[in-house]
Image: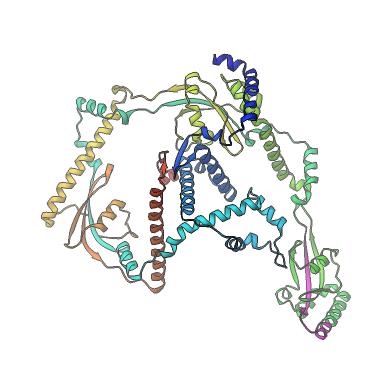
Amino acid sequence: MFEAIRKHSKIVIVLLFLLIIPSFVLVGMNSNYFSEKSPVVARVDGSKIRQTDWDSAHRTQSDRIRAQAPTVDPKLLDSPQARYATLERLVREHVLTAAAHAMRLVTNDARLASSLQEIPEIARLRRADGTLDADAYRALTAGLGLTPEGFEADMRRSLSVNQVMDGVRRTAFGTQESARLALDALYGQREIQLARFNAADFSAKVAATDAELQAYYQAHTTQLQRTEQASVEYLLLDPGSLRAAIHLSEEDLRTYYQENQARLAGKQERRASHILVNAPRDALAAERERAKERAAQLLAQVRKNPAGFAEVAKSASDDKGSAEAGGDLNFFSRGAMVKPFEDAVFALKKGEISDLVETDFGYHIIVLTDVKAPPSFEELRPSLEEELRQQQAQRKFAELAEAFSNAVYEQADSLQAVAEKFQLPLQTAAGVTRSPAPGAQGPLANAQFLQALFAPDALQNKRNTQAVETGPNQLAAGRVTQYTPAATPPFEEVRAHVRNLYRAEKSVELARQSGQAKLAAWKKAPATATGLTAVALVSREQSQNLPRPVIDAALRAPVDALPAWVGVDLGAEGYAVVKVNRVVARKAPDAQRAQQEQQKYQQWLTAAEEQAYYALLKQRFKVQIQVARPQAIDLAGAAEN
């Protein structure tokens, strides 16, 4: 039945169109018709946050980061950890919005206007008479993808929400004494010695019988299970994949250059030197007249001997900043100087000396010394090709996106024909799992695309997935060519691996037992302790390259009776016994450091109170996040790789 529908899909689409559209006309379409089918990923105060909301928020966040940092690694933005962080931010916004509504926190027009004026980009749009340049304001908000009304609504909502946490921030207060006690404990030092019981040293003592290995295998079948995997092929449609097929003619480039010459070449820059005779606007008329007469004399002097302009500027110009350089103002473009001065400069020919130019500063004599010509077509050719090719690829992507989506659905048994039609490389990958693998790139780093690949129809029938939006202006479609379900391999196949796991586990147990026995003995008779390291002075700032659990245990150990002994479980590495010999009081910091530490303590205290208050709000508004938190990225391992 479904095969028949696929073969006659266009007919079916027409029939569905005729049946469904009249119902929308008669009944009306609910704006949530499609979003209601999206799975719920979180709930806040009874309202639902759906997958579509999450995806949209993450796209917006990723686009914003890419715009601010174009060189950021795309893998970091598409990682499960980054996506989950977006979901947490989305939940936080909903929680604070619900709290603001419950507390009836609102932002009045005066507060909104004041806050808008505090934004430098908006403050610069004020005219001399105090009015706002409405057109420039509209252009500014359009750059953010908003109308002025939408921008102000977002700003009003943000100000209301910020009031929820403002009360906590303003009331968090730590005294100097509480800061001293906390910081002394944090930065305090202790003199310690250490005995290590490394698991690797006990490995040779572990003898594993076949029965023990079989028992270990049976008890750890889940741990030994191989995850389901798939070999896949996929297509990626994006401007980058379409660029190679775009051919630019000489005419295309020259036409684009002519149409965009002003933008591409940039503003014309001119270099000028000047002599200034001070005469402020508020000076007496007689003073301004005397200044004008002096300027006229200087003008006659430099016109008589143009080559001596720089020397006259050095000796006579009242602009001391440029006088030392012979009046040179270097290159500048329109908009950099006051208008009368600018108009005069851009009206001169190279080497020409102006008449007297009057500004608010006084009277100027100007000579145009150079003109920086805009780049030629040939100089701009590489950037022209890059920009025009990108624009055409972007346009072509927009034209092909719908056709690509239809093609992968209508030819569901293969991607080869679609690849040939759209001139796209058919890419392959093996060992693909439901979750993005470390280091995965492109569509294989996108959770939504992987979900489509492992959907029942794609797995069981080897059908193409639908076209999935894996990023801004990116569509991907794939199909599974081979699938291996999750399974525990036979014992004989993993015998060596089981032996290694068993030996590692038993080695850790032996190391722990040996360390705990020594700990008990040394507590009773400290003089019998042997194998301790040399004395080391440690603190949270100076770890002496010791494991963090050792430092934490040493600094937390009770010191009412010294020496103090404490055992530390180092996990797979084994065990350690720490001997604390003495506590070294922290030196009193100087005044500047003490002030910095007080500020740091206040920041920590404020952050802690904010976190605690937010945790209470989450409980009050019954927050439920229905997506598992991914494991943290191993930054050290990532750096090594």
Position of residue 361 in the picture relative to residue 551 (left or right): right
Q: Determine the residue located farthest toward the left in the rendered image.
A: 525
Residue 281 part of the magenta-drawn span: yes
Reply above or below: 323 against 39. below
Q: Residue at x 74, y 44 (%)?
A: 381
Check the picture and name the quadrant holding the C terminus. top left
Closer-to-camera residue (364/408): 408
Q: Where does the image place residue 170, in percent across and percent down from the top left?
A: 44, 64
Q: Determine the residue located farthest toward the bottom in the rendered image.
A: 286
Q: Is residue 641 visible?
A: no
Q: Where does the image place residue 326, in percent across and percent down from the top left?
A: 75, 73
Quarter of the image for residue 169 reads bottom left
Closer-to-camera residue (308/78): 78
Q: Residue at x 26, y 36 (%)?
A: 504
Q: Where does the image place residue 560, in percent across and percent down from the top left?
A: 18, 63
Residue 442 part of the magenta-drawn span: no
Check the picture and name the quadrant holding the N terminus. top right
Q: Which residues are magenta?
A: 269-290
Q: How is the image coloured?
A: rainbow
Closer-to-camera residue (351/433): 433
Closer-to-camera residue (235/201): 235
Q: Where does the image place residue 420, in percent across and percent down from the top left?
A: 64, 23
Position of residue 272 in the picture relative to residue 51 (left or right): right
Q: Residue at x 67, y 34 (%)?
A: 398
Total label count? Answer: 0
Q: Residue at x 77, y 36 (%)?
A: 249
Q: Is residue 285 visible?
A: yes
Position of residue 7 in the picture relative to residue 225 (left or right): right
Quarter of the image for residue 540 reads bottom left
